Image: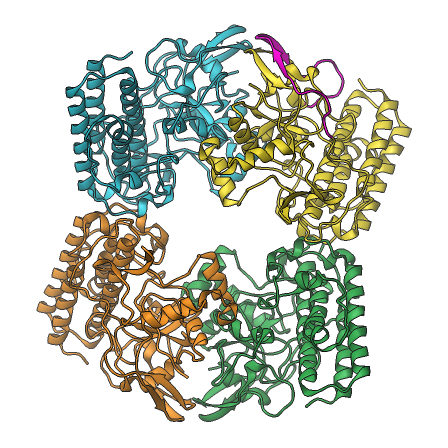
Chain colours: A cyan, B orange, C green, D yellow
Amino acid sequence: MITEETLLNLFTETRRDTEKICSHLETEDYVVQPVVDVSPPKWHLGHTTWFFEEFVLKKYAEGYELFDDNSAFVFNSYYESVGEKVVRTDRGNLSRPTVAWVYEYRKYVTDAILEFFSKRKLNEEIKEVLEIGCHHEKQHQELLLTDIKYILGNNPLLPYYSGDFIENTVEENKREWIKIEEGIHETGHKGDSFSYDNERKRHKNYLQEFEISNQLVTNGEYLQFMEAGGYKDVLLWHAEGWDWIHSEDIIAPFYWHRKHNEWHQYTMQGLQKLDPEAPLSHISYYEAFAYAQWKGCRLPTEFEWEAASEKFDWGRRWEWTESAYSPYPGFKTAEGALGEYNGKFMVNQKVLRGGSVATSQNHTRNTYRNFFHPHLRWQFTGIRLAK
Amino acid sequence: MITEETLLNLFTETRRDTEKICSHLETEDYVVQPVVDVSPPKWHLGHTTWFFEEFVLKKYAEGYELFDDNSAFVFNSYYESVGEKVVRTDRGNLSRPTVAWVYEYRKYVTDAILEFFSKRKLNEEIKEVLEIGCHHEKQHQELLLTDIKYILGNNPLLPYYSGDFIENTVEENKREWIKIEEGIHETGHKGDSFSYDNERKRHKNYLQEFEISNQLVTNGEYLQFMEAGGYKDVLLWHAEGWDWIHSEDIIAPFYWHRKHNEWHQYTMQGLQKLDPEAPLSHISYYEAFAYAQWKGCRLPTEFEWEAASEKFDWGRRWEWTESAYSPYPGFKTAEGALGEYNGKFMVNQKVLRGGSVATSQNHTRNTYRNFFHPHLRWQFTGIRLAK
Amino acid sequence: MITEETLLNLFTETRRDTEKICSHLETEDYVVQPVVDVSPPKWHLGHTTWFFEEFVLKKYAEGYELFDDNSAFVFNSYYESVGEKVVRTDRGNLSRPTVAWVYEYRKYVTDAILEFFSKRKLNEEIKEVLEIGCHHEKQHQELLLTDIKYILGNNPLLPYYSGDFIENTVEENKREWIKIEEGIHETGHKGDSFSYDNERKRHKNYLQEFEISNQLVTNGEYLQFMEAGGYKDVLLWHAEGWDWIHSEDIIAPFYWHRKHNEWHQYTMQGLQKLDPEAPLSHISYYEAFAYAQWKGCRLPTEFEWEAASEKFDWGRRWEWTESAYSPYPGFKTAEGALGEYNGKFMVNQKVLRGGSVATSQNHTRNTYRNFFHPHLRWQFTGIRLAK
Amino acid sequence: MITEETLLNLFTETRRDTEKICSHLETEDYVVQPVVDVSPPKWHLGHTTWFFEEFVLKKYAEGYELFDDNSAFVFNSYYESVGEKVVRTDRGNLSRPTVAWVYEYRKYVTDAILEFFSKRKLNEEIKEVLEIGCHHEKQHQELLLTDIKYILGNNPLLPYYSGDFIENTVEENKREWIKIEEGIHETGHKGDSFSYDNERKRHKNYLQEFEISNQLVTNGEYLQFMEAGGYKDVLLWHAEGWDWIHSEDIIAPFYWHRKHNEWHQYTMQGLQKLDPEAPLSHISYYEAFAYAQWKGCRLPTEFEWEAASEKFDWGRRWEWTESAYSPYPGFKTAEGALGEYNGKFMVNQKVLRGGSVATSQNHTRNTYRNFFHPHLRWQFTGIRLAK
């Protein structure tokens, strides 16, 4: 189990990092919600704070007074069993509470938790919730970055965010296929360090022999697919993917812009010429699948990915797998509100493995299961081929 | 024609008043657009400024340099012939340009217009456009107030705006029917003071004898209609009105809230107990019509209203009329972009006459024709009965 | 008042004509509803029958037994005060009752009405309802024809209906402008022959001097508008018309098809080459307005149209007017269910005057007010210019 | 490989059975499409015929003349690479070709295939396509039955179809849990009898120990879930399931009606009192999952189901599994148009195993993988619990 000191450091660093991400924003950037899957930064700041207030302070901190009676109402998320939530599509309509108020709320709760640490010895139950709260906030740090990119990248002015955030780092090593032998492989989290319920319990899987690439697909390779008419060949696509590219007029990855007859890409440093060597990003599962079909390959399953993960360098892109998001054998939903965390999303979503340039440090691991609907593109998603 | 001095005063006062309305806002309030008919205050500030830049400075001020090349793109409205507009539903997604930027833009253009005044004698053509620009901005002052009310009044915190804005003033005089004789009456703007193209030209109408109330319908009277089952009697409603109240779950005027078993009303001073003596507000044409049916009366036509308007005191509420918004005989669309101003909306809208507590001083007159779709309720709309 | 003998003839002929229209159909054609504004022919047959059962037989025919308890439920239309209606969009989902059943229902009710005639002297009240029932069915005869054209004309096989129905008859006389003097003109139905409540009461209108064309706009003239870029010039269109042509991809009148580089038109005799001399048909109010703008003319108001109607030959096309559908002075909704007939549609619709090739004989007159939403095109609508 | 004689019998019997299913219909029943997932019976008849014309006669039968040039256009389905398809939502708008025409088309093609059999020795390639064509038509036989149930069961008259089709047969044996040992189990089709590409290739899976019920959940058991508030407890549902029951107002299985305070069920013999002993039917995956949660159990994976399938009696209901529809290791899409058959649907769907009272004889097997979106209920779907 995590020590109290490590936990305190984790908490302090997490709270600080969240605010650092927002330090490049204007007040107005905190408020808007251009699309339902993106949340206003103000909401992320409040929601991660509400989590500590709701699940730690209200429950364990004697004499704690709520910062404001309305915060639960406004900053609750999908935890339907705790209280009435603000419908996600409405989050971008709320000018109040103000950004300044949200920062006061953060400080109030952060201080209360620090005081809580200083006053008593924490038992395992409390430490577990606090640790989940930190990892929960780290998840939101990644969403903050991708939501900010969406908010700025869909503004006609295409603003600059910060030079510190580097998206596109080229993989320099030699491209190779890694072969994995047929047989029983273990899947799932091992040991007692932190993991989510959906990574457990570790169990055996029988895999057929397969090969997996040691590198991500690059922008240049994907361009070849585009230029070969990949978006126009119905045989490469799922039926729903084909409908989706037509109803949404998809002809290229998200954030790609054709300008002066050349492909550009919106990055956190504004619009830049496309780097053909950099790993492809911001594509849907549908596009990942179609690309793989075109190459005569396929996407790995999450079990294959995990079995091979120590043999390649990952972490630049969340990598689409062929696996649907389902419970592992023996998966049990936790009791109470925290139990809503993962299980309720286990339908109609695809698993992504790895982590991305936007993932918080030490947040991911090779058993981590991220998941999104197959059409979503605002995360730093990529492709690693298998065959 | 207006003198240069009067025009200068009008311009200075108009630009100042717009900013005064916004002085009670937080930065976040300027940004959101909770519904398509409401625009973010930031947009109103920019759009009224863009109007002067586009139609005065760009055209007549030699050597004028645009504040920013993108302003036309962002702050254009429905003037499709001038440039690509930002789709109205997208206005609430734009965090940039910032509020501070918009205020700089305002100052830059205001100063440029003032310099323009100081440097040359203005001819009639320029004075006309400048005067339209001021009246255009006064129109947006009213929209600013009603949009702010919507933004705050749909926030679960129901914030206080300012004590200066008084919505509900009771009519104290004795209630009476005013009778108007059958015969030819003149309709439309007379004289050469400012008016919009849609108020012209003055022309003859033959009216049957009719009676019109000297007072607006009150909250208390409307409550009787509600309590008598007005919202449940299909025979009182237009077919489209009936569909509308059911698809939108309408059971009371907008901003009415049932709390502790009593009706309250959101006002610019927050939630208040309903005043039964105050004039009813925030109802749709459909509701106005159904109420009139229930009373065995009807709504006046705009011609009747105008013919009788000097015999009663008006100006608290925009008053729904039975008249559809159509061109007067001989109406001609102006040449060029300004010609898009009014004519293009002359379908599927109902005329409202009068003016409201949110109307800028000296902005309305008894020939002024306001118009909205029959379901809209966020303006200070009311009912005056005829028979 | 109508005599009993005339009424009997009217009834017999009306019932017969409805079935004659359907005699060219296959069973399958009776069932489908390709779009919400079109009803399945089976429904028209049942609904016009239900009208006589509900408002005559149930009320006045002693001992009458309903053909089936479900008929009111299935064949009621907009008469919400009589019983639960089948939602209009669901009409095309109902395979039962069968077409054969509906014909039996018709025969049963027709026979019952004939027996009713034979047994007793009819008082004025009953005669009035019977006469309305006949005119109601005649209205549905026109809808039957236009709905059948829609059902067949939107089938990829473009089937032939019948050679008896001629749509396109050229106006041979010389084109001229008819001038009408300024002054008071009377509008509305005169005398005690049949008319609808919305044509009454006759009243005075003051009209400015105007001119109106003695002919309808032809296909060839409209083609010039199209070739001059009429669908691409935003300044010619209402804002809502402009949105409509873009959301619906409208580039030509309804039923026009470009084939082998030439314009064709679907008619009741299948696809035919466009006749440039024939009167234009199947255009929306938005298109009629835009065409008139382009010609530097306008559409007449319904009052102008009526005042001039004896000076030109009309009846080929329903002619869009500039007038919104509103009550005449003194209009009163009838008591009870029949009162729902007209008044409840008096919002968001435009008046059409005249009549069309699909109108039943003797059904229309120069005071008849037809009305449709401004985007609808499946009727035989046309344009007569004014200025 | 199948012998020519067996194949001929299979073909003859399949074509006959399809028409037998339709023999209870009225002409009108063949035409309508009340919801997008249901196709008009006329379309099924034509589409299964088109399959033989397109993939056998056009390709292999020398001198074959198409019955009609338009049939491919109208009766193609999802085979986007063969020709322009009629959008599925439009199928219910087409009154032509008529039902009589479709039967002639069937006879023409059936005769041509029989002649084809009689004239030449069939090679393996042709036999394979013919066999697929028969199995394809058998699949459509099941859809015909469920679509007919939908068409009749959503008609307010709730018509009787036929007494021959029995839906509700009680399982009489003793309820027990079947235990399956942990270890490697084989999944997928074995041998060279007919199977679909998605059942292949047979491969090893490592399964944990589990238990599975020898019986389906009954109506009575599901009623207990309903009466215990199962539809109101958010913790039992997937987030998307919860949204779905609310947006669609789901409070009971499909075809259940509350009448005179008792639950009834629409069956092919009309409305009947609910039999609590009969196996539950017409529930979505969301409901199956929520029920299993409530019981403290879960749904089996498709691999578990297959491993245990020889130990229980299945075939009354298609049984929802927890498995998402994905390719087996080594799955390859077939070349050309037939390759569109299965692979393109492998996203966002859940696998169902077993077969139902509507499944054609000898059509299913314990490796057969059916699949539907998780919200669909018009098939005879049921629940078998695992733990």
- Please provide the residue range marked out in magenta: D170-196
Answer left or right for C114 relative to C72. Answer: right
Residue C232 in sight: no
Measured from the top left, where is residue B38 in percent x and y?
Answer: 32, 57
Residue A198 in sight: yes
Q: Does residue C277 show up magenta in the picture?
A: no
Q: Relative to residue A333, is residue B62 depicted above or below?
A: below
- Determine the main secondary structure of the stretch shown in magenta: loop
Measured from the top left, where is residue D284 in percent x and y?
Answer: 58, 35
Measured from the top left, where is residue A214 in percent x and y?
Answer: 42, 13
Q: Residue at x 82, y 36 (%)?
A: D17
- Which quadrant of the structure image shows residue A67? top left
User: Quadrant location of the N terminus of chain D?
Assistant: top right
Answer left or right for B363 relative to B9. Answer: right
User: Quadrant location of the C terminus of chain D?
Assistant: top right
Answer left or right for A70 relative to A81. Answer: left
Measured from the top left, where is residue B348 in percent x and y?
Answer: 44, 68
Q: Nearer the viewer, residue A105 or B69?
A: A105
Q: Does residue D175 show up magenta in the picture?
A: yes
Q: Nearer the viewer, residue B7 or D258?
A: D258
Pick out the residue farthest to the left. Answer: B118
Q: Nearer the viewer, residue C144 or A201?
A: A201
